[in-house]
Amino acid sequence: PIMVSIARFVSVAAAVAAALPPAAAQIPKSKFMGVKLDEAEDGAVGLGEFAEKAAFGGGSSLPSYQDLWDAAFDVMPAVHDLRRDLHAHPEVMFTESWTSARIQSELSGLNVSYTTGWAKNTKAAELKAKGMSSGPGGTGVVAEIGTGKPPCVLLRADIDALPIKETPLVPFVSENDGKSHACGHDSHIAMLVGAAALLKRREATTGINGTIRLIFQPAEEGGAGGKRMVEEGVLSQYPPVQGAVGFHQWPFIPLGTIGGRPGTFLAATELFEITVSGIGGHAAMPHAVVDPIVASAAVITALQSIAARETSPLDSAVVSVTMVHAGDAYNVIPSGAQICGTIRSLSDAGLKRLRQRVGEVVENVAGGHRCNVTVSWSPDAYPPTYNDPALFEWAKEVAAPASITGAVDVIEPTMGGEDFSFIAQEVPSVFLALGSGEKSWTGLMEEFGPEVGPLDTTGESGYDLQRKFNTTTTPLPQPHCV
């Protein structure tokens, strides 16, 4: 839930900072604490009042989780409204101009310093060649709270949406046709802005030991926006990042729980595009053509043997064909066909093997059918997302009180991919799963009304809901992510 996530985010950030070694739509006015430290809009708790309440009291020691949760509920209405506004204005990779401006508006309202222009799209031509819609980039935002000196910890949220049409089930449905926040990045943004609000309050009251760098990263969905930001120096600029924390909503574990594991948590991923070229002709005379459709069918079947017959049952490998395109007439055998899909492994070496074998299988099988073939790959393969074991064990202790189970549950790795992996390659990192599975959305909607529904546990009665609902078993529909 968003409330738990903010509390965990703030506690992890503050603790790591103390422990680490030395656009078309109008942007609305921020509903967070406002520009002044002692004033707030619409009855929200201002920073001055927050200090008087001493929700973060006690010198430089870490606040209790009860204090953090109480503070999180103070900003929940603003987090709730921000998330819904973001959900209604989804933007795909490297085009997130409105989203970036919205984030900047919120940070300005909090008096949080930030820089813009991050994650320029240096692979636009390659993405276009893959048929992937993208823009110029430069929509990333990097904010800092604290002293501006070491130690420095990084918190990251991804900000892009997907080119998927949203079913209009909620009043804040996507206003951008053919685009939706189907992977939940809208909530990630809202959570990180909410964390910024609480961290800014702590900075103004008891102070922060070091620097917390908040990055709002574009183009996670296949554009390697995380890699672009690493290349641009988001980790190396002063003060250099010494540890990083990321997270994702996780419909496969119950609402209110937190999961993760030491070592490899998410897979290395790569996309492929196979072009099979033959000689077209009339369907009535197949003997006079070189049929790329028959060759493609054989290629697709043969590719399945890589995971099924060449990979140990004790290892993990995915070779999935997800798109096939050929022909445009009932009685004409086309001259070419296209096969697209993805390969995945829990190791770089495993991904390298899969890539090699896909190339070999495709060439030999297509050649056996007298066809020529070419294979092209992603502009950027994603490496595995690796949780530093020592940092993970430490983070488990810090985050445990935020889970309804009182622990961070060790869960199985997933074959999904994440470009947080590019950050985790460079600095010790932890990537956690925030449980969003719910046992009965129908029952919840009957009790609390249609405002509360899938991927939205923050309806008008959602605050009470999050306090009381602790028994969840059935996951939500799977998010459409990398």
Image: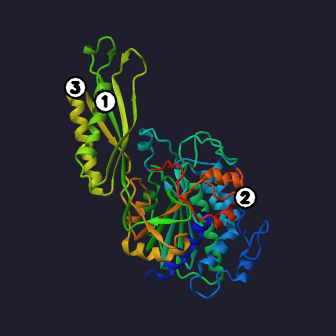
Residue at 37% across / 38% down in the picture? 340
- Residue reaching furthest to the bottom: 59
Residue at 24% across / 46% down in the picture? 356
Question: Please, what secondary structure does the residue beneath circle 3 have?
Answer: loop
Tell me which amino acid carries mark 1. Answer: Ala
- Residue reaching furthest to the right: 42
Tell me which amino acid carries mark 3. Answer: Arg
Q: Is residue 265 left or right of residue 305?
A: right
- Do the residues under discs 1 and 3 have CB atoms within 8 angstroms? no
Residue 72 image point, x, y percent? 65, 71
Specify whether residue 48 is in view: yes
- Residue reaching furthest to the top: 284
**Residue that carries the numbered disc 1 in the rendered image:** 297
Whole-number angstrom distance, CA of label 1 to CA of label 2:
52 Å
**Residue that carries the numbered disc 2 in the rendered image:** 460
Q: Is residue 401 left or right of residue 351?
A: right
Residue at 69% across / 51% down in the picture? 446
**Residue 49 versus residue 188 in the image, above or below:** below
Colour logic: rainbow
Whole-number angstrom distance, CA of label 3 to CA of label 2:
64 Å
**Residue that carries the numbered disc 3 in the rendered image:** 370
Tell me which amino acid carries mark 2. Answer: Glu
